[in-house]
Structure formats: structure tokens, C-alpha cells
Amino acid sequence: MALRGRISGTGSDGRERCEYKDPVLGINLYKANQDLIQGEAVIMQNCIWQGGVRGRNGSTRINPTTLGNYRIRGGHKYYYGAGSPTSKRLIAYDTKIASLSDAGTAVSLTTGMTSDLECYFATWPITDSVYISNATDTLRKYDGTTFSTVSGTAIPAARGPVVPVLDRLMAITVNGIERTNPRVDNVWSNNSSWATLRPIKPGLFTVIHPFTVRGTDTLYPGALAFQSNAFYLISGTDFGDDVTSLSPSTGENGSIQLLDPNIGTASPKSVCTVPGVGVFWFTTDLNVYFMPEGSLTGRYVGDKIKATGDIPGCDAANTAALNQVWMTYHDRKLYLGIPVGTDTFSTKQFWMDIRAFLLTDGEPVWYGPMDGQSVGCAWVENANGDNSVYGGEGNSANGAFVYRLDVPNTFTDAVGLDDNAITGVYQTMFEDFGIPSRQKYLRGVHMDLSQDEAVASVDVYDLPGIIAQNIPLQAVTD
């Protein structure tokens, strides 16, 4: 359903008394309902604002039959072959890493991974290979032809994804952050006095993420390193010639700097870069943090989806399953998936409108909650002519499926083998008609709506509760 134009109310003398503006500021779950302002909404369940309020797009399944009663634990589009560009969609489930075609055919690359672990992928252009890690198995590698275990010196069982920084890879281990020799993947530092980067605060690193520092007229590639309650900047222009040496080479200047001792993440798959905007992540205190591009300080942008009422917000996330929170960016939208209550996979999503975020000078505009999907991980495919966002099923009871998400002109959600109707709920702010303390009599409500494939009805509420319920669409459009 799409609401276009306006919703207006008429007083007892027949004169128009109010107009409900389009919810261009999105939802605000933090304020009391009566304190919302024009442009804010109580709820936009499965709705977004795009030239009017409309239902979100649905999803379709890639593989027509299940790959088994497993969760999809990771996904990635591997683009490779500089002379002859090609790509493969890689997914992780059970003990397998497999490639999955657009037709839904899965080809196993290995069945030798430790079963049912969160899996991370990272492509390194220097070797034209993708690296696979799961915090337990020794680092794996795939070059489009051969899947192998990386062999050599001190190969880590990386915790989280490996990250390319300048001419080497970096990875988290129990000792800290290890690095390779220049342009190779088979020689790693190992609890080195200088090459292993360590946190200042107690505790393990949870994830590292690529990050570029902007100088006056130069870009310096580096990384952000996170603990659950802190984050750091890794930077440098020379990370050493031989990381197995007892002392650093001349000119080595790699460093790690504490940026904030209180804000971190326990959600490795939630750290997301929005090109030209900055880095977002889900914090351990159940909020969303944003660090603008070119800055080393940031701010919270998730307050509007921290609930004080009956609608669950991001603060309803299962704190025992924070590693299941994910974020990804596509088509000017930042998607946040969280496991709610006791759920162990994402069951609610909130979408931030990045276009509105930029137009409003950084005012967060959120839509949701988006219900009906059980996506455990999500990734974007956006090279070689691709331009889509994909997700892996998080509920093993539904079977191992991969979905294309946010599919235009699709009005159902693929969940396992089912195609479920999407129910949208949009509730405006409460209008006090200029006199908050006086009871009102509404003679009429005018709404401009258009529909695609849905059945719409309208409820009328005042602060004490519901006034009229399930008014059919035709009755309010006459």
C-alpha cells in the first residue's frame, strides 16, 4: 500500500483542522506517542517512505530446494580474474563452503569445516583470492579453482574476517592482531613483541574492519579494531619487512591507537561502511554508532529505535546472541537485523534512509520494524553488473536457503519453501488539533491512497485507546 499526498481531519464546523504530514522523519520509538512531531510516526511496520508511505519490497529464494536443515552461516560474492572478470557466490553452512549459482545449484568446495560456525569471507586483490575464517579452523583460501588450507609460518585460525591493509593481511587471534609479510599470505607474525598489535583495555578483539584515514592531500589505508567495549585505529605506511624477525625493520611505523574506551561491538557482522558517508556498527549497549568519513570521533544514531513503549526496538536484542546482529548497505538504505528476546537469529530489521540522513544534515531516519524474515546474515553483490542484496536463512527449521532481498515489485517474503504475505502497519503521530486537553469530535478523515496487491483498513485511535477499528478502505476514500 502507498499513501500519497496527505491525511487530514475535519472539525465539527466542517473546516479542516489538521494535516498529518508524510513521515519523512521516520519512526521514533523513544518518545511517548503524544510527543511525536509532524513528520514522525509511531510505527512503520514493513513500510518505508519513498514519495509516500509504501510497503517494503519482499524477497525471493535462490535455491528452490533446501540444502539441509542448517543455518546459512556466511555469504559473499567473490569477484576475481583480472584479465577475464568472473564471480562466484560463496556460502557457508554445516561443514561446507559451497558456490551457489543464480539458478540455485550448489557445488561443494569443501566439507571439512568445523560444523555450524559463523563464517567470514574477505577478498584480497593482491593474490586474487578469497579467504575464509571461522575462529576455529586454520585460515582457508579459494582462488576460483582450488580450495585449500593456507600453509606456511604461523597461519592463524582467524577470529572474524581477515582485513587487507596496504600490502598485507591482518587477522585477530587470542594474542592480538597478527600481520603477514608484504604481499604474501603464508608468513604471519606470532605473538611478536612488535608485529602483534595488542589492546590497551583487557579482553579480546572482536573484529577488525577496513578504514581509510584522510590526510591533508593523502589517503592512508588502515583498519578499525574493536573490543566489546572499545575501538582503536590501526594505521601506518610501513608494517615491516619480516614479521618473524625479533625486531622491526628500519622505517616500520605501524601503530594502534585507542579512539574510545567505552564504545565497541560484540557484533562482528554489524560493522558496515557506507561509501562517502562513514562507518556504522551495533554497540554492546544496544545502539547504533556512526563515525563519519574523515573523522575519528562519532555519535549514536540509534536513539529513535530504542523503545520506551510496546513496540520492540533495537534495545530488545538478545544480549546472549549479539554476534547474530548484522548490518549491510544497499540502494541508499542501511539494513540492521537483530535477534529479539530469546531469538538466536535475526527476526526484526530496521532500515535507515541514508538519502534522508544526508539531506537532513545527519538526522537519523529509521523505518520499521520489518517483520516476517529470518535472515541470519546478509551481503551485497555489486560488481560485474550485479546490484542486489542477499541473505541467508538463520532458522535451521526452515532449511538452508539463500534469498534475494528487497526485490522490486515483490509483495511476499520467501521463508523456507513458503511465500508469506507481508503485513504493513503505519500509525501516524497523535494530532492535538491545537488544544491538547479537550475532547474532539472528528466529522471526517480524508486519505489519498493507492494500492498494489493488498487489503487495507484504517483504525482511529486517541490517547485513551481505539475509537474505530477495521474501517474498510473504500469507506475512507469516498
Image (cartoon, rainbow, N blue to C red):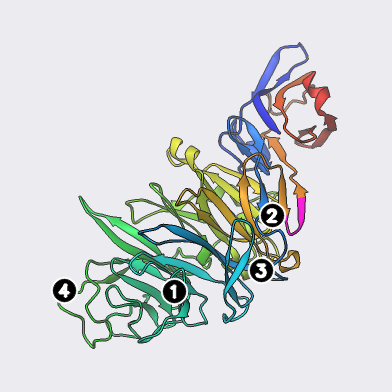
Binning the other alpha carbons within 10 Å of mark 3 as few (below 14), some (14 to 19) or many (20 upward) gives many
Q: Which-is-in-front pick, marks 4 and 3?
A: 3
Q: Which-is-in-front pick, marks 3 and 1?
A: 3
Q: Which amino acid does the dot numbered 4 rest on?
A: Gly
- Look at mark 1 in the image and give the residue it sits on: 205
Q: Earlier in the sequence, mark 4 or mark 3?
A: 3
Residue 373 — which label? 2
- Look at mark 4 in the image and give the residue it sits on: 251
Magenta stretch bounds: 415-419
Whether 27 is drawn above or below 8: the answer is below
> Does residue 417 belong to the magenta stretch?
yes
Helix, strand or loop under label 2: loop
- Asked where in the image residue 141 lies, by quadrant, the reply is bottom left
- Asked where in the image residue 261 lies, by quadrant, the reply is bottom left
Separation (CA) of disc 4 from disc 3: 47 Å
Q: Nearer the viewer, residue 105 or 12?
A: 105
Q: Nearer the viewer, residue 112 or 436?
A: 112
Q: Nearer the viewer, residue 328 or 282?
A: 328
Position of 439 with respect to 348 (left or right) is: right
Position of 382 with respect to 407 (left or right) is: left
Whether 317 is drawn above or below 180: the answer is above
Q: Which-is-in-front pick, marks 1 and 2?
A: 2
Q: Are marks 1 and 2 in contact (CB under 8 Å)?
A: no
